[in-house]
Image (cartoon, rainbow, N blue to C red):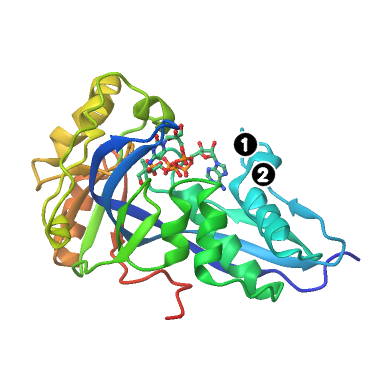
């Protein structure tokens, strides 16, 4: 019997980019960003059981995503390679975060695997080392390992903790899936936002430099933003397609959710002050 522990469940929250400015492009094609990331309580669950044969096995691959490409499997293998761990893991994924929605679900699943297996395998790598392993899997992975709301620079991997308000969100899915790479490589993308001098301002200035190109390519996103603007000031998260509205009170979010959930797949979510696996260290 290869399994040597029972399955344990670990949460993987979605993220919102409260603001996202593109300030330049590196020689390797990756873009320089300034963004404020926060976590919300819309979550996937990753179940993990330790194996004694060193294998990494995904029990329930996502349709259309081969197990070897799944970010959870890649994260577990990257941790084995970096730590020399000889143990393996069986993985079961319970997806709730829509894919290709700009909510970072795959990256969050990967970060949860890194954080959880680092404990289950007793590899004891420091958080920064896990972030360094994570960035090779995807630019969004480090912030989930970092575990706190963050002002991000670099390609989204240089992180400073920042304050975010207690808030509730209505997240709308416009019904299309946006390919991140296509938006980053689009001719019409503006890449010249001025880097901010006062970082604190970034939590109040809200924009998304990817929104205009996504709206050109996917009119469904523009229509969703127009509809949502009847209830507040919506913004797209990441490279889309999801759109969100922020509210101070749960009741306000609840009323808007009621109104919009007949037109869109919608989620109501509480903003988190830290990642559920963040232990303060
Ligand atoms: C746009 C953001 C904002 O948080 O989020 P999502 O919309 O994906 O959630 C991220 O920067 C996405 O991060 P992630 O989805 O992990 O990106 P990766 O897998 O590393 O890269 C996907 C593609 O986007 C491009 N890319 C990504 C990040 C970045 N700073 N510059 C880029 O040019 C890469 O060249 C690659 O072609
Ligand atoms: N565990 C995973 N969950 C979701 N998507 C994954 C996973 N592993 C690999 N992927 C791939 O990553 C792509 C981006 O997914 P995701 O991170 O959910 O969206 P986004 O980058 O828009 O926030 C998916 O379309 C899928 O092909």
Label 1 CA crowd tier, 10 Å (few <14, some 14–19, many 20+): few
Mark 2 Cα shell of 10 Å, populated few (<14), some (14-19), many (≥20): some
Task: Give how far across and how far down residue 129 sits, in percent.
Answer: 55, 64
Number of numbered tags placed on the structure image: 2
Quadrant hosting residue 229: top left
What residue sits right under mark 2 in the picture? 61
- 22 and 101: which one is in front? 22
Q: Report helix, strand or loop for mark 1.
A: loop
Q: In the picture, residue 130 is in which quadrant?
A: bottom right
Q: Is residue 5 above or below residue 56?
A: below
Q: Marks 2 and 1: CB-CB under 8 Å?
A: yes
Q: In this view, does 224 lie above or below 2?
A: above
Distance Cα–Cα, label 2 vs label 1: 7 Å
Is 126 displayed left or right of 262 in the figure? right
Asked whether mark 1 and ligand 2 are closer than 8 Å, the reply comes as: yes
Left or right of residue 76: residue 141: left
Residue occupying the point 22% across, 69% down: 163
Q: Can residue 96 be seen in this view?
A: no
């Amino acid at each position: 019997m290869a399994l040597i522990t029972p399955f344990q469940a670990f949460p993987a929250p979605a993220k919102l980019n409260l603001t996202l400015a593109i300030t330049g492009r590196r020689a390797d094609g990756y873009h320089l960003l300034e963004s404020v990331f926060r976590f919300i309580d819309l979550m996937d669950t990753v179940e993990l059981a330790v194996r004694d044969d060193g294998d990494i096995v995904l029990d329930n691959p996502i349709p259309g995503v081969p197990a070897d490409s799944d970010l959870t499997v890649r994260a577990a293998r990257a941790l084995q390679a970096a730590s020399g761990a000889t143990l393996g893991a069986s993985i079961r994924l319970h997806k709730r975060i829509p894919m290709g929605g700009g909510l970072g679900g795959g990256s969050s699943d990967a970060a949860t695997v890194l954080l959880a297996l680092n404990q289950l395998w007793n590899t004891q790598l420091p958080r920064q080392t896990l972030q360094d392993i994570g960035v090779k899997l995807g630019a969004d992975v480090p912030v989930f390992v970092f575990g706190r709301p963050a002002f991000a620079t670099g390609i989204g991997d240089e992180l400073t903790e920042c304050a975010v308000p207690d808030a509730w969100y209505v997240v709308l899915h416009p019904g299309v899936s946006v390919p991140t790479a296509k938006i980053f490589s689009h001719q019409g993308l503006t890449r010249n936002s001025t880097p901010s001098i006062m970082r604190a301002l970034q939590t109040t200035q809200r924009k998304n430099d990817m929104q205009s190109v996504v709206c050109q390519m996917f009119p469904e996103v523009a229509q969703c933003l127009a509809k949502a603007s009847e209830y507040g000031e919506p913004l797209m998260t990441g490279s889309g397609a999801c759109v969100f509205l922020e509210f101070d009170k749960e009741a306000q979010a609840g009323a808007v959710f009621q109104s919009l959930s007949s037109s869109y797949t919608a989620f109501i979510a509480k903003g988190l002050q830290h990642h559920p696996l963040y232990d303060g260290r």
